[in-house]
Amino acid sequence: MLRRLFPRLVLLLAGVLAVHTLVGVTLLLGATHELAVGHTVRSLETKISAADVLLAQPDRAMAEQRLRQFGVERRDQAPPADADIGALQSEVAAELARRQPTRTLHLSATPQPMLWIAAERAPDGWIGIPVLSLRGAVRASSALAFLASVLLVFGAAAWYARTLVNPLRALAAAAPGLVAGEPAPALPRHAVSEIVELGAALDRAAADTRAAAQERQLMLAGLSHDMRTPLARLVLALEMLEGDAAMRAGMAADLAELDAILSQFIAFVRDGRDEPGQNIDAGALLDEALAAQRRGGAHWQRLGNASAMLYAKPLALRRALDNLLENAQRHGVAPFEAELRVLPSGMHIAVRDRGAGVPPDTLHELGRPFYRADAARSGPGSGLGLASVARIAAWHGGSLELSNRDGGGFVAELRLVAARG
């Protein structure tokens, strides 16, 4: 089954044209059949009468010359009759025999269809008159008309399909941006009204998305400011308090966790949609993220390609890499690996650990906002880390794939679009 619009459209038009041509030719032949038989009989009678008049002239040489000019032959003996003759010629011969009951006639097929009729005077022999076949002419003209029509339909279908498909392709290419709240692309002036209406509707939806995102950012910015101020006061007050050192350390850790959760909320909302893209070295960006983790005491093994050029939003992509590395350290066990692979289809960054992994029946839930594999939610985190990575990957035309490793462990693979440069 054809899946693309252009071949479907051409096939539809070609099929309609073929049926239309077949029906038209059939109706034409049916409507003109009797007319063609009558016209041919009258033409043959006229030539027979002219031949009789000429053969009655005393100058036989002049008479036969004039007959040849009319396309008429005279023979003493006519060729034998042929049974394999066209239906039209047979009907013409039958009608002519009805009109000329006193004269003998028959048809021969070679070298061309000829009607042979006995001359009016026996010594003059036989008169041969070509009976032109309309079948070949009709077939040839119908085939030529069909070919010309098919070429015309292909040209019209190509133009029409472009006017229909190109605006749809433009909207499809802009879909990731529309989801991010970017305006819809300008459509060609020849775009059909339904597609123009679709573009306008998508533009309105993108505007609503932008407005909602701006309101959400303002809300969370205010929330961040309002919450971090009392958090800072609590940290300061805790430092000034005297008491159990272990309790103070636990309270300080709780405050730090609150601040980290708040940062994850902000990072999830500010997913980089407003950050301009640029050509970056994904390998260098990964090395910077690993260096920051090593300064914190983590041990990471770097594998794969050293560098790979990519058009991306560097701050957003760096946040995604930091989230993946911190997620592996928080929930996994060493050795930790980060591998960059450049493939013909794109660029993959895999982050691996040798921890316990996650239950297989929960793998499809990972990456959903606020979902945590820790059902009791006793561990640190808000369940937004992987969700933020998935959103950042989507803005870059890629995806996040999560799976357990053979032999134990977990792997998060960030798949990005094809590298540039």
Image: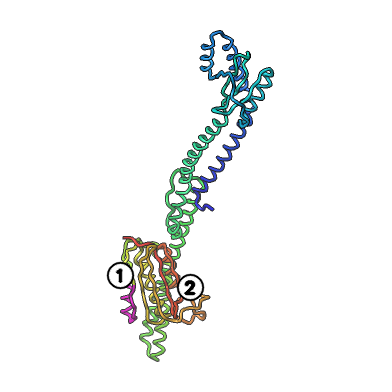
The numbered mark at residue 237 is: none
Q: Is residue 203 above or below residue 148?
A: below
Q: Position of residue 353 (x, y in %)?
A: 40, 78
Q: Position of residue 137 (x, y in %)?
A: 54, 30
Q: Residues within 10 Å of mark 2 (few under 14, many from 20)?
A: many
Where are the magenta residues, as a range? 286-303
Judging from the image, the colouring scheme is rainbow
Q: Is residue 76 above or below residue 8?
A: above
Residue type, numbered disc 1: Ala
Q: Is residue 290 magenta?
A: yes
Q: Residue at x 56, y 18 (%)?
A: 74
Q: Position of residue 66 (x, y in %)?
A: 52, 14
The answer to which image quadrant residue 307 occupies is: bottom left
Q: Residue at x 46, y 76 (%)?
A: 404
Residue tagged by mark 2? 366
The answer to which image quadrant residue 114 occupies is: top right
Q: Residue at x 58, y 37 (%)?
A: 22
Residue most extreme to the top: 58
Front in this rendered view, residue 149 or 106: 106
Which quadrant of the figure contains the C terminus?
A: bottom left
Is residue 248 visible to us here? yes
Q: Nearer the viewer, mark 2 or mark 1?
A: 1
Q: Residues within 10 Å of mark 1 (few under 14, many from 20)?
A: some
Instruction: Give the mark nearest the N terminus, 2 or 1.
Output: 1
Front in this rendered view, residue 364 or 265: 364
Q: Position of residue 336 (x, y in %)?
A: 37, 79
Residue type, numbered disc 2: Leu
Front in this rendered view, residue 222 or 266: 266
The numbered mark at residue 306 is: 1
Q: Is residue 50 above or below residue 370?
A: above
The answer to which image quadrant residue 420 occupies is: bottom left
